[in-house]
Amino acid sequence: MKPAVFDYYSPSELDEALCLLDEFGYDAKIMSGGQSLIPMMNMRLARPKVVIDISKIEELNYIRITDSVIQIGGLTRHFQVEESKEIEQVCPLLTEGMKLIGHSQIRSRGTIGGSVVHADPTAELPVMLSTLGATITLASSEEVRTLTTDEFFMTYLTTTIETNEILVSIEIPIPPANTGYAIDEFTLRKGDFAIVLAAASVTLDEQGKVKSATLCLGGVDGVPVLLDEVTEELIGNFPDSDLILECCNRIGDLVDPEPDIHASGEYRRDLSITYAKRVLERAAMRAVNRKG
């Protein structure tokens, strides 16, 4: 199919784009990489009267790393994060997770901001950001505000971004050196959206016991699900496989996935336990290796 008729604007500065949003309001849609919006328009699931293509706003395309945080502009493309040696060194979860997103053609066009705002609960980036404790910065012509992932993601394909706002950046705190990460997913075919995906972060203390841990699941609810009830039992203990399995077996009582054409709720629940155990074990092993 072809999209419905629309007017097209291509601003080169953020202020210009924000002014256009103020002018057209609900009639406008922002396009960055177009990997989500264009298919929806072609199927007429989205029918904006105005498309504001922000891909030429170079001030939103950057990766900056300080001693404490990683800052990534909203128009930074997936492949730029994937290929960044600096990010691989300080936050290998991002590098590993980016390789799971679609195919190389998608990663060469898709943007960080576009993926986050699209808010598919089976997409890798929202799950990674939730695992990493990232914050999301939105800008309008009136104000700039920063939200946690819990504050930003609402439900399926829905966020708290307002019609006059653009996602301008994300910020990720750099963790201690003795932290291990892992991400894994179950897909029907390579490059598909996941049926279930899991990401984990494990930080060890000087004795090799778990100091902090995070586990996040995608594909089991309308938003990424952080399972503090699982990881809190690891704190203060050595992360052996038996303890991790015992903790992950609780997941069956904590998530209640809805069935769809791809998988039943029960199957998603079983996958959640399997993949949670897998990423927690891998993250713990990597933390031990980094500590050593």
Image (cartoon, rainbow, N blue to C red):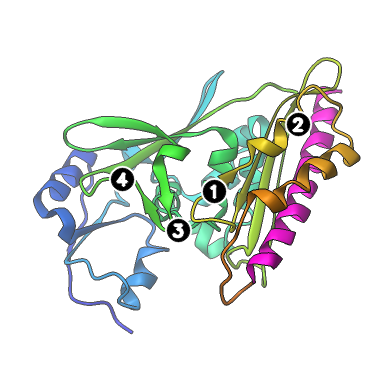
Which residue is painted at 90% across and 40% down in the image? Answer: 242
Name the residue: 22% across, 38% down. Answer: 140
Circle 3 crowding by C-alpha within 10 Å: few under 14, some 14–19, many from 20: some
Lower position in the chain sequence, tag 2 or tag 4: 4
Residue furthest out toward the front: 253
Mark earlier in primary sequence (4, 1): 4
Furthest residue toward top: 206
Q: Earlier in the sequence, mark 3 or mark 4?
A: 3
Mark found first going from the N terminus, 3 or 1:
3
Q: Amino acid at mark 1?
A: Pro
Q: Earlier in the sequence, mark 1 or mark 2?
A: 1
Residue that carries the numbered disc 4 in the rendered image: 161
In this view, the mark in front (3 or 2): 2
Q: Nearer the viewer, mark 1 or mark 2?
A: 2
- Is disc 2 surrounded by few (<14), some (14 to 19) or many (20+) residues within 10 Å? some
- Callout 1: helix, strand or loop? loop
Q: Secondary structure at mark 4?
A: loop
| The N terminus - image quarter | bottom left
Q: Residue at the bottom extreme? A: 1
Q: Nearer the N terminus, badge 3 or badge 2?
A: 3
Mark 1 and mark 2: Cα distance apart in space = 20 Å
In front of the other: 218 or 126: 218
Residue placed under numbered mark 3 in the picture: 109
Classify 10 Å Cα crowding around label 1: few (below 14), some (14-19), many (20 and above).
Answer: many
